[in-house]
Image (cartoon, rainbow, N blue to C red):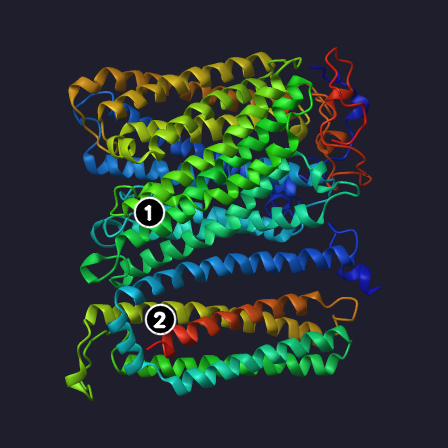
Amino acid sequence: MHQAGHLAHQFEDLAQQKEASTLGMWAFLATELMFFGGALTCFVVYRSFYAHAFAQASREHMSIPLGTINTAVLLCSSLTVAMGVHFARHGQQRKLIVMLLATIFLAITFLCIKATEYYTEYRHELVPGLNFHYPPHHHEHPDRLTANPANVELFFCFYFFLTALHALHMIVGVGIFSVITVKAWRGAFSPEYYNPVEVSGLYWHFVDLVWIFLFPLLYLLH
Amino acid sequence: MTTVSYNPALEPRESYINVAYTVKSWLLTLDHKRIGILYLIAITAFFFIGGVFATIIRLELMTPQGDLVSDDTYNKLFTLHGVVMIFFFLIPSIPATIGNFVIPLMLGARDLAFPRLNLLSWYIFMIGGTLSLIAAITGGVDTGWTFYTPYSSVFSNTRVVLTVLGVFVTGFSSILTGLNFVITTHTMRAPGLTWRRLPLFIWALYATSIIMLLGTPVIAITVLLVAAERIFHLGIFNPALGGDPVLFQHLFWFYSHPAVYIMILPGMGVISEIVTCFSRKNVFGYTFIAASSLAIAFISFLVWGHHMFVSTQSVYGGMIFSFLSFLVAVPSAIKVFNWTATLYKGSISFHAPMLYAGGFVGLFTLGGLTGLFLAALGLDVHVHDTYFIVAHFHYIMVGGAVMAYMGAIHYWWPKITGRMYTEWLARIAAVIIFLGFNLTFFPQFILGYLGMPRRYHAYPPEFQVLNVMSTAGASILAVGYVIPLCYLLWSLWHGKIAGPNPWKATGLEWQTPSPPPTENFHEIPVVTGPPYQYHLEEVPFAPSRPPGAPV
């Protein structure tokens, strides 16, 4: 009965449908890779052009504790997603829903921490296009200001561009998992049919992986 | 050609067309065939819009003085011509119309793997197209279709943001189409349809889709950065603020050179189908043609630097890119040689699709060979940004891609509509297009070699004769494009009933009625042989392979 309900008209059977949707997500992630790859290439080029200014901007204004906490939060969310897929495969509906809710909670935690970082940077007048002033008015170590402000601005251009793009992907992920949770609540998934959970999980792992690249590039590379 | 004569008994059959007639049934359809038609209507409109821009450009260039339009207007005209023709006609042309329609039929599938994404891609395409058209109407854009920074991001006073937003949005329709094709080819093949039995059109579109998937995101992120730079006055690609404009060119051409192959590879697939069908002979070198499609897709990602030979790229870098650009000619040449080998001793008939195929082979070869001139480091400096390059890429894009598109439309028209067009008119139009095309663009090779730069609305008087020839050719070309529009539309009501297989072709798509039913096949076919089985016909030059043996 489940079979008939979940099988789209163009497929012959559930196995074919599952193969198509999984492969489809992998192909989509390949495009995402090129999408982020283009922006990361720009960042790396300018990182090598203006190594000194980028290192200084990162050293002075990136909060490693917050970045580390966020990395941990995101890694935990990948774990909860993986466990959710596991429970879905074994038909444990309640545990699946718990894991999905935990994932959404962790994602929102990440976004909140990210928002406080943005707010701090806004207060320090570091947002290009909005209020960028470098050196900032209340700088603690005026003697250490050696970097070209234009190059520091370039760092922040890419910092905001990359992290905002990543955050946008997370917001989309929260939306997806909300829908999946509602579906799970209604009992849509079974050991025979759970590929929406698995495919969304793939997406989430990718978003996680992007952060794994952004964190060292933006926060740690001094 | 034999057409099944009109038989009323065949008429009351249900097809994808007569299953419902409401506007809603078209705008909310999930049927790949109907979505293909939606794309066909949209890109035909864009083709004629782009054609209007081209017409004004050619009229302006009839006289050496810039007297018809101002220089600013001229800049907008060639920009809009490029943007519309490339992003809204050539890139979606064969894949989104013919590909959408025939891929599931060729694979023996009921639909593409993701019908809803397919419909979504059309809406995304229309949104992107609308944004760009709004930009065109409310002031235009004058950066050239390449959006080079910092002119586009700092200095231009035209609608750059809106236009690049249109390009950005449209990119996603291209990605979704490519994704759908790749997944469909992997997972939806009929029983027995192994990879080595796939029609060459499928191979070509598979390779195209890979480029769409991996290339398009890069232009998306690039134009997004340009838009951000322009809106927020950032310095991402602005040298005055520490940015690097050459980096923009790298990213832009990383997509836009492979995009050339998005435009030409589907055409090559079409030609492979047409040449074998109208030679009544199995395609020569199936494996090589299939593999060369993949090789072109792969190498296409490694040649972008040949657009920057004079943009401060290192000579060493230039040499590498020059070598790789020569290399991409090898798989293209493999295709041309295999097509000619297919023709050899075939029983060739010159129906309209075959005329276009012949035109393609000749014009593509000329365009491809002049591409080698441009890949040569020294010669490129001489002809860089002249009419030589304009002629070169029009030989590939119009002489190649548009010819193949016209061939594809004529070849599959009976399948799509169930009707035959007027053959003699179609042949005349094909010849007119071929002649008009050459008269338009061959003089531009000479103009460029003599040193006439592109993108100027005025030129020294000694170039006038060749420019007048070019404009005369363009008007012939325009007539050539309007004629098919008329007789194809006419055929919808008055064309002879085509029957399932008017060309006696051997693909799966010809084994279902024309127009096909919504579910494509009443019963999913089982494939037992190679895609081309023309050698089974009674022909005196039967190839050495015994009938029925696997290829």
Q: Determine the chain carrying the residue at label 1.
A: B
Q: Element under label 1?
A: helix
Res B16 visible: no
Residue beneath disc 2: A160
Residue type of the residue flagged with mark 2: Phe
**Above or below B75: residue A31:** below
Residue beneath disc 1: B317
Image x and y of residue A43, in percent: 35, 65
Quadrant containing the C terminus of chain A in the rendered view: bottom left
**Nearer-the-camera pick, A106 or B125:** A106
**Nearer-the-camera pick, A76 or B436:** A76
**Above or below B146: residue B539:** above
The Cα atoms of the two marked residues, 1 and 2, are separated by 32 Å
Left or right side of B280 for B74 = left
Quadrant containing the N terminus of chain A in the rendered view: bottom right
**Nearer-the-camera pick, B460 or A71:** A71
Image x and y of residue A29, in percent: 55, 61
Which residue occupies 41% across, 38% down?
Answer: B325
Q: Element under label 2?
A: helix
